[in-house]
Amino acid sequence: MEPSELRRAVEAGRTTAAKLGLQADDAIVVHNSDRVALRLIPCDVLARVAPSGHLADSEFEVEVARRLADVDAPVAELDPRAEPRAYVRGAFAVSLWTYYEPMGSEIAPADYADVFLRHHSALRRIDLEAPHVTDRIAVALREVTDRERSPELPDSDRELLSGTLSGLSATISTGEARDQLLHGEPHPGNLLNTRRGPLFVDLATCCRGPVEFDLAHAPEEVGKHYAGADHGLIHRCRALNWAMFSAWRWRRDDHMPDRDRWRVEGLNRVRAALDRCGLS
């Protein structure tokens, strides 16, 4: 968020907590992108604040978290002192979560795979309507094919991204018997190492598809410890993930910090991933 919007988002988070009797004298910005995560002090709540246009996503994330808590999934939990819902405060949607003090040590690949196995098992035990992975790919493809949405994307790179998104989407949409609920974006930044053990956060990306789509977000060594994984499919999904990432960076209204660098890096990662699949 831009500084002026960030200030309003911080105030929305603090006010929401205060209205519920939670003392929020100060707020530390933990993460700032299209939505922000704030550590509220001294109540020690993590407030996730998004523009009100993302209210449906915030409500969906809360519902995912609530259901997964019931089956003891390895996920961050909502703050028990607040009603489990998304609160509308001015131009923002606010949800309140338990704050977990991060541990400094890196999560080993075998432990990463183990938490994946437990999370996927928990996801199979809940009943939830969620989009398919291919629906998300279609949204990214629309950004690439519409020149008004991505006016600065060079033609050759537009062809690379559209071909990758459309071609590889077809290869992962034919195995519906293996589809299940997924985290959706379980990259290392969305897996916290806490005193309770590794916990997944950012649950609004929950979708349906093969587990290899989730595994493709993790470091490469992780998939080798996940029993039954299709490693060829992981490589194809990794190319898809980078193609979607790149599609978002070329959007006219994308505000990711250091966007120009990530535009170049994303395309390089797509090419490298396609090389790995033998599809360059």
Image: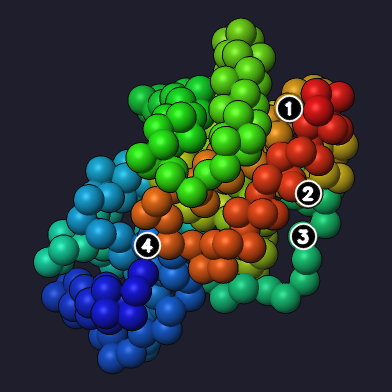
Label 4 vs label 3: CA separation? 26 Å
Label 4 vs label 2: CA separation? 25 Å
The residue positioned 74% from the left and 47% from the top of the image is 268
Q: Could you tell me the amino acid type at mark 3?
A: Ile
Label 3 vs label 1: CA separation? 24 Å
**Residue 55: image location, x then y, percent:** 23, 49
Which badge, 3 or 2, comes first in the chain's sequence?
A: 3
Which badge, 1 or 4, comes first in the chain's sequence?
A: 4
- Residue picked out by circle 2: 219
Picture quadrant where residue 51 is located: bottom left
Q: Give the class, few, some or many, for how many residues have Cα within 10 Å of label 3's Cα (few <14, many ≥20).
A: some
- Residue picked out by circle 4: 35
Disc 3, disc 2: CB below 8 Å? no
Disc 3, disc 1: CB below 8 Å? no
**Residue 206: image location, x then y, percent:** 47, 37
**Is residue 73 something one can see in this rendering?**
no
- Residue picked out by circle 1: 236
